[in-house]
Amino acid sequence: MDYTEADKAEQEKRKKEQIELRNKKRYSAMFMFFACVFEIIETFIIIFVGIIVISFFMFKVFHADPEAHGTLFSVLLIVDLVGGLFLGFKVYKKTITWVIKKKNIKDKLSDEIINHYFTDPRQELKKRQKR
C-alpha cells in the first residue's frame, strides 16, 4: 500500500486537526472546571458580604426593634441569598468574558464555550422569533 505525497499530506493534516480538537477539549474542560470553582467562591463571598452589610444596617444604623430581629433578619437573609446568587451569576459571566478577552484564549477553547459567553441572548431570541 503505497501512499502518494498528497495522501501523506492529507493524513498529516487530519492528525493535526485531531490533536488540535483534543487540546481544545482538554483546555475547555480545565477552563470550565476552574470557572465553576471561581463562580462558587465568588458567589459565597458576595452572599457573605451581603449578610454582613444587612446585619450592620439592621443592628447599627436602623436600630430595629429586638422583637422583630428574627423575622426581619430571616426576610433579609432570603433577599440576600436570591440577590447574591443573581449578582454572582452576572459578575461571573462578566469576569469570564473579560478573562477570555484579556488572556486571548478564544482560539484555545471550544466553540460551544465561546458561543456561550459571547452571544447576546436577546439576539438569539430575535433569531428564533423570525423563524
Image (tube, grey):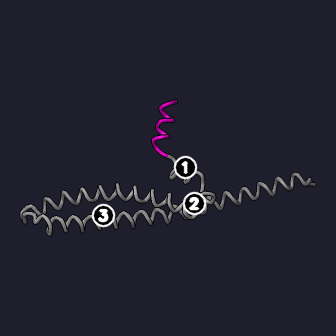
Where residue 80 sits, quadrant-wise, is: bottom left
Is 129 situated above or below 30? above
Q: Nearer the viewer, mark 2 or mark 1?
A: 1
State the residue position of label 2: 28
The type of residue carrying mark 1 is Asn
Is 122 included in the stretch rendered in magenta?
Answer: yes
Whole-percent x, y for residue 5 in the image: 90, 54
The type of residue carrying mark 3 is Ile
Which residues make up the magenta segment? 120-130
Q: Residue furthest top?
A: 131
Whole-percent x, y for residue 41 in the image: 39, 67
Name which residue lies at 49% across and 34% down: 128
Measure the alpha-carbon separation of dots 2 and 1.
Answer: 13 Å
The type of residue carrying mark 2 is Ser
Where residue 73 sits, quadrant-wise, is: bottom left
Where residue 82 sits, quadrant-wise, is: bottom left
Q: Check if mark 1's residue and mark 3's residue have beta carbons within 8 Å.
A: no
State the residue position of label 1: 115
> In terms of secondary structure, where does tag 2 sit?
helix
Crowding around mark 3 (Cα neighbors within 10 Å: few <14, some 14 to 19, many 20+) is many
- How many numbered badges does the structure rendering display? 3
For the N terminus, the quadrant is bottom right
State the residue position of label 3: 47
> In terms of secondary structure, where does tag 3 sit?
helix
Q: Check if mark 2's residue and mark 3's residue have beta carbons within 8 Å.
A: no
